[in-house]
């Protein structure tokens, strides 16, 4: 089974090496690594090209944002399963992809997700939050839950059937896509109790209070775009879950 790993980056010269090396280190033989760069000006391209024999596709050009870049990667992907590991993030262990391939080969699921370690951007050994995916229950979306997108592998066929990321959303398109796939279209999903990625904190949805507020507005908008009405308590419950995960190491 071929797995496409898509890495989106922009001005990530000091982080991209460890991301690429975490993909190269995988013990699964059939990995297609796709790197989409937004036209970096800090030497990111030169660092990526050091690994050109290990990268199936490398595109460096201006884009319309991170989700536009992710969609470019999806259009190039030929793997049966697709995962995203963006610049600065790292696949957790050498056997992560082979583990996920075995899970997909058991059959019956289009989406399989696990856990994510959210780490200090300057010290990846310091875990700030343990994002535990938890057993799948579609109804949990109404309680502010979603699977951790960085720790989610999805069959490429799902994107072909139900569409790519909605680039009208600037921060919450990953939530909308997961909601569309799992809640609206009821794709069969499965949780695996394994840490799949180390994710550096500091992404778009966590940069400032204004970004957090915009992300939450887009969560509500995602429901409307898919013909559903969200509970007004959903976002407070979502924020509470984040606080609990942070205080208790994410194991609640």
Image (spheres, grey):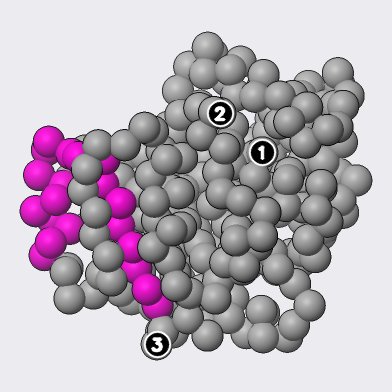
Is disc 2 in contact with disc 3, using a CB cutoff of under 8 Å? no
Q: Which residue is drawn at 82% across and 41% down?
A: 141
Q: Mark 3 points at which residue?
A: 29
Residue 86 seen by the camera: no
Q: Name the residue under label 2.
A: 169
Residue 146 seen by the camera: yes
User: Left or right: where does residue 149 sit relative to residue 190?
Assistant: left
Residue 39 lies in the magenta-colored region: yes
**Nearer to the camera, 138 or 17:** 138
First reached walking from the N terminus: tag 2 or tag 3: 3
Between the C-alphas of marks 1 and 3, the distance is 32 Å
Is disc 2 in contact with disc 1, using a CB cutoff of under 8 Å? yes
Residue stretch rendered in magenta on the structure = 31-50
User: Left or right: where does residue 134 sit relative to residue 168?
Assistant: right
| Crowdedness near tag 3: few (<14), some (14–19) or many (≥20) residues, C-alpha within 10 Å | few
Residue 25 placement (x, y as % from top left): 33, 76
């Amino acid at each position: 089974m071929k797995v496409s790993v898509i890495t989106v980056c922009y001005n990530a010269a000091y982080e991209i090496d460890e991301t690429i090396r975490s993909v190269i280190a995988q013990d699964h033989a059939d990995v297609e690594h796709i790197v989409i760069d937004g036209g970096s000006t800090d030497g990111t391209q030169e660092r990526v090209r050091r690994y050109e024999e290990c990268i199936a596709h490398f595109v460096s050009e201006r884009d319309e944002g991170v989700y536009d870049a992710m969609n470019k990667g999806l259009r190039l992907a030929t793997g049966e399963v697709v995962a995203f590991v963006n610049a600065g993030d790292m696949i957790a262990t050498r056997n992560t992809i082979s583990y996920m391939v075995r899970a997909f080969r058991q059959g019956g699921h289009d989406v399989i997700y696990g856990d994510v370690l959210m780490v200090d951007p300057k010290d990846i050994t310091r875990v700030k939050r343990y994002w535990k995916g938890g057993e799948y229950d579609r109804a949990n979306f109404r309680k502010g839950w979603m699977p951790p997108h960085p720790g989610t592998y999805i069959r490429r066929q799902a994107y072909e059937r139900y569409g790519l990321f909605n680039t009208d959303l600037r921060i919450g398109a990953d939530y909308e896509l997961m909601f569309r796939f799992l809640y609206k279209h009821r794709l069969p999903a499965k949780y695996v109790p394994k840490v799949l990625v180390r994710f550096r904190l500091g992404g778009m949805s966590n940069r400032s209070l204004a970004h957090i507020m915009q992300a939450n507005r887009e969560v509500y908008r995602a429901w409307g775009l898919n013909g559903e009405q969200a509970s007004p308590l959903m976002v407070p419950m979502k924020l509470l879950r984040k606080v609990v995960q942070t205080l208790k190491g994410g194991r609640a």
